[in-house]
Amino acid sequence: MKNCLIAFLLICFQTVKSQSNNLVWYNDLNKALPVSIKNDKPLLLFFTGSDWCGWCMRLKKEVFNYPEFKEWTDSNVVMVELDFPRRKKLDSIILNQNRELARVFGVSGYPTVWLVKPQILESSKINFLKLGKLGYVAGGPEKWISVAQKFLNQN
């Protein structure tokens, strides 16, 4: 009985630990861009259907909710969530932004994660250098991060 109680408490602790990351997600690209440029960090663009996409929920649960992911993102990227929910209503400006970015990046399924480096052109316009694209990767945060890091290391 004592062993069962200890196992239960360990499971509860892991669940709380994995869900207490406090990740910093932007939903407005115009707010994330200055942070990315100032800190010389690429953008992580997470195209998701937050309230209906099973693979998106699984990616969050198995990767994004872990401290290893937070440590990696804090050091390496600025995160932008580009949501396409079915049950919640988005502000029309954010919805139009998300649709335009999905078109620009050729998103045809969810989850899709693009790692991009913003570049300021002479005309003061922004160009996105595409570093790489990935989605759900089985194997937990370490495996997902190792795939994403390969894209960052190429530049």
Image: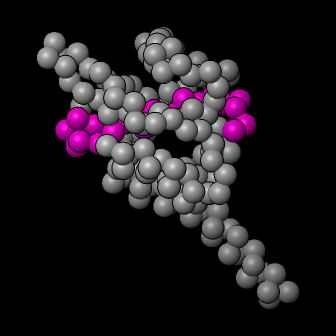
Q: Position of residue 99 (x, y in %)?
A: 51, 14
Q: Position of residue 46 (x, y in %)?
A: 51, 34
How was this image coloured? one colour
Instruction: Name the residue located 50 percent from the left edge and 27 percent from the top edge.
Output: 82
Q: Position of residue 71 (x, y in %)?
A: 41, 58
Instruction: Name the residue located 24 percent from the left edge and 27 percent from the top edge.
Output: 119
Quadrant containing the C terminus in the rendered view: top left
Q: Does residue 100 lie above or below 57 as drawn?
A: above
Q: Residue furthest bottom?
A: 2
Identify which residue, 20 or 121, lies in the foreground.
Answer: 121
**Is residue 19 visible from the viewing direction of this image?**
no
Q: What segment is highlighted magenta in the picture?
A: 35-55
Q: Does residue 115 lie above or below 23 as drawn?
A: above
- Describe residue 111's horizontal placement relative to residue 31 as left or right: right
Q: Does residue 125 lie above or below 44 as drawn?
A: above
Instruction: Name the residue located 65 percent from the left edge and 57 percent from the top edge.
Output: 139
Kindly indicate the quadrant of the structure image that contains residue 75: bottom left
Q: Does residue 108 lie above or below 114 as drawn?
A: above
